[in-house]
Amino acid sequence: MKISDSKAILSTAYFPPIEYFAVMANSQQVYIQGGEMYQKQSYRTRCSINSANGVLVLTMPVLRSNSQADSPEAKSTHKVYIEDIHIDYSKPWVLQHKRAIEAAYMSSPFFEYYKDDIFPILESNIDSLFELNLKLIKVIAELIGIDCKITVAKEYLTEDKLNDITDYRETIHPKRENNILESMKLNKPYYQVFTNKQGFVKNLSILDLLFNEGPNSISYLESYTKGQE
């Protein structure tokens, strides 16, 4: 199968890592999984940026819906559908994340160019975690120039229903190693603000690539094998 003809399925993620967008850039169609159970300590609510003091993890606080939280099953198993996870705006996380991103990337070449496309989404007080992540993913994909079709899979796709869809839902995880970038020949450095101090840090949030490389981001993400047999 040609990479350009491929289909992939991903879990939702907050400012996902570069490998997530590499999958998108090298796929014809991408499904974002709805109807799944929420997982803590995953990319669904966290991202990693490169600060002056090293890698900084930003985590979004969330709440379960009242109906789910009050059910006996939710209390005993903590199994809650991703669509029933709401963002907790009682904490000043939006301001904290904006300040951290600005401090990390204000001197990057393209921060000023893209921030007005991204920060207003964070400030829009979208209630649903899934909807906020989806909007951010679509906007960033558009800014980069990724032209794959993005579809929400409302039903959880079990293995027998995947057919020709490559499953990255559990592969892309902050606590699991994978070789996605290596297999696409994308394990290569690019300009980073703090390279002289820290060396190159791979697979950070897509924000790191976007703010540092701008329009060149799409060239970085597209595998040189794209379109080849």
Image (cartoon, rainbow, N blue to C red):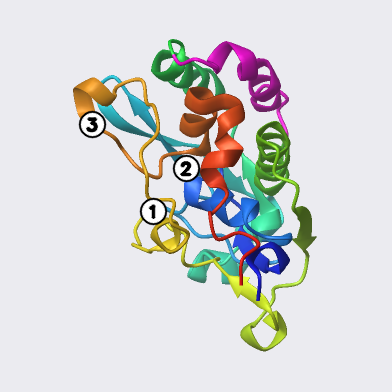
Q: Describe the element under mark 3 as helix, strand or loop.
A: loop
Compared to 6, does 23 lie above or below? Answer: above
Residue farthest along the front direction in this orientation: 228
Q: Secondary structure at mark 1?
A: loop
> For mark 2, what is the residue?
46
Badge 1: residue crowd in 10 Å (few <14, some 14–19, many ≥20)? few
- The CA span between labels 3 and 1 is 20 Å
The residue under label 3 is 199
Of marks 2 and 1, which one's residue comes earlier in the chain? 2
Residue visible at 28% across and 35% down in the picture: 200
Q: Earlier in the sequence, mark 3 or mark 2?
A: 2
Query: Type of residue at label 1?
Result: Pro
| Amino acid beneath label 2 | Arg
Q: Could you say whether the residue bearing mark 2 is in a helix, strand or loop?
A: strand
Frontmost of labels 3 and 2 is: 3
How far from the left and from the top, in percent, is residue 90? Answer: 57, 27
Magenta segment:
108-126
> Could you tell me which residue is drawn at 52 percent across and 24 percent down?
211
- Looking at the rendered structure, the kind of residue marked 3 is Gly
- Residue 112 is a magenta residue: yes
The C terminus, quarter of image: bottom right
- Residue at mark 2 to residue at mark 1: CA–CA distance: 9 Å
**Which of these two is toward me, 196 or 114?**
196
Name which residue lies at 61% across and 28% down: 215
Residue 174: give its label: 1
- Give the overall secondary structure of the magenta segment: helix
Query: Which of these two is toward me, 155 or 159?
Result: 159
Q: Tell me where residue 168 sits by quadrant.
A: bottom right
